[in-house]
Image: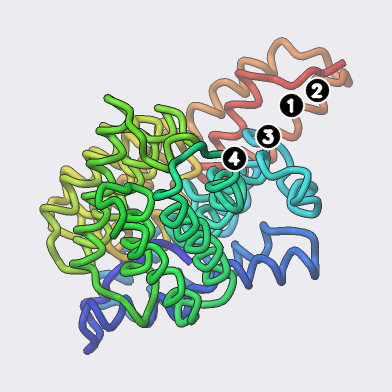
Amino acid sequence: MATFSYNPNSNESRFSQYGRFLQNQNYVNKIDKSIRETGSITTRVIEIQSKEIQKIIQESSQSQRDAIIQTRDSICSSLESGFSYLYEDLGDIKDGIRDINSNLEDIYDSINGLTNIVGHGFSLVLEGHKITHKYLGKVVELLRIPQSQLERAYNIDKGMEFINSAFMESSDSEFYTNALKKFETALSYEETDFLSLYYIGFIYLKSNKYLDPMKAERYFLESARYYLSHAQYGGSNIASVLLTVNDCILEAAKAYLFAAESCYIQEKFSEAILLAEKAWMTFPEMTKARFAQAKYSAANNQISEAAKILEEVLRNKPSLSMEVFSDRDLISKPKISQLMEMLKVEAVQEAKANYELCRKVIIPNSIASSYLADIDKLIKLGTFLDAKKANDMILFPKNLG
């Protein structure tokens, strides 16, 4: 499921729609079931994403439908191509997931890549693996701390355990209650504990029982503030022994991005735009923060600015074009739809031109000739991502032996 987008044609409030979104958003179990049944994550995600797109079309006004339908025919191919891009960048995720205990680092990196493609729908998966890989069972074990701080460390460790269990259930999981109590206890020992602040914010944003975007925003902003302070000056925070300076900066950027999402739910679009931009400026490699800035700009009817940012994002990371198709704030705007069409035409023309140059110098019936035939097939599919992939194959050919 893509990042939450408000449906203005519904009688439900934004807050109510987001609550329903959380109830329907159980990626962990859906992915786990898909992997057990087929060993593949791709098919399941494409199915979910395609259903989201169809739902958007059904719920949109006629003018919005016209804009969406302009790009609908190329969506499935684009989704397939996007995952192809991901696999080439990060390796084959399927084998790593089957052997999760021995491949946690690969899984963490791969899911991080997936988050860039399908938005915050995968945030629970990513957070769960981050906890398992970086924190769970290690907070007390790795620290040399005074006896007075052991209780605080214990509560953080248990809070991590409970919230990880909640991720594996649903947005109504009682484990969120257990986790909240533990993190609040940890904060009573140290009010600047950025890790506890972050996960309390996460509970207020991702749990139906405690859903409170205003509180979530506040906790995420406090967390980001102390993460960055620690990155700059250091300190004795319990989590510091588990995190590098770069880790702290990345976590601060993520906290800003979740704070932006909290503002979006509250219809504080200007604040959401600024916070998404702040996340990106804090950690420029976080492309999804720039994408979120485009989304929130579109929601605030700053369409020209949204299109400008989105074009920059898609030129740098073409696979994010998949997310555009299922985001109501973006694809319902004719100017964004026109941008997607322009990028597609440009990519196809560039791929065709490069293909023709190669065809003139390729020896007939050679291995390279067969490789070129595969490129031709991609170009003929006529989608943005397929054309981008074809062009990459021309400019960065595999070893043809």
Residue 273 appears in the picture as rendered: yes
**Amino acid on which the number 1 mark rests in the picture:** Leu
**Residue shown at 42% from the left, 66% from the top:** 182
**Above or below, comparing residue 92 to residue 213 in the picture:** above
Note whether 75 is above or below 386 in the view shown: below
Q: Distance between the Cα atoms at labels 3 and 1?
A: 6 Å
Q: Which residue is mark 2?
A: 369
Q: Between 250 and 226, which is closer to the camera in this rendering?
A: 226
Find the distance from the CA under tag 2 to the CA under tag 1. Answer: 5 Å
Relative to 304, is 182 on the left or the right? right
Left or right, 266 with respect to 389, comes to left
Q: Nearer the viewer, residue 382 or 320?
A: 320
Callout 2: SS = helix
Mark 3 lies on residue? 376
| Residue occupied by mark 1 | 372
- Mark 4 vs mark 2, foreground winner is 4
* Spot occupied by residue 109 in the image (x, y as percentages of width and height): 59, 40
| Residue at the spot of label 4 | 109
> Which comes sooner in the sequence, label 4 or label 1?
4
- Residue name at image x 87 percent, y 18 percent: 366
Tell me if label 3 and label 1 are in contact, CB under 8 Å: yes
Along the horizontal axis of the image, is 113 left or right of 396?
Answer: left
Name the quadrant containing residue 359: top right
**C-alpha span from label 4 to label 2:** 35 Å
Please determine whether, in this image, residue 50 is positioned above or below residue 240: below
Instruction: Characterize the local packing of mark 3: few (<14), some (14-19) or many (20 or more) Cα atoms within 10 angstroms.
Output: some
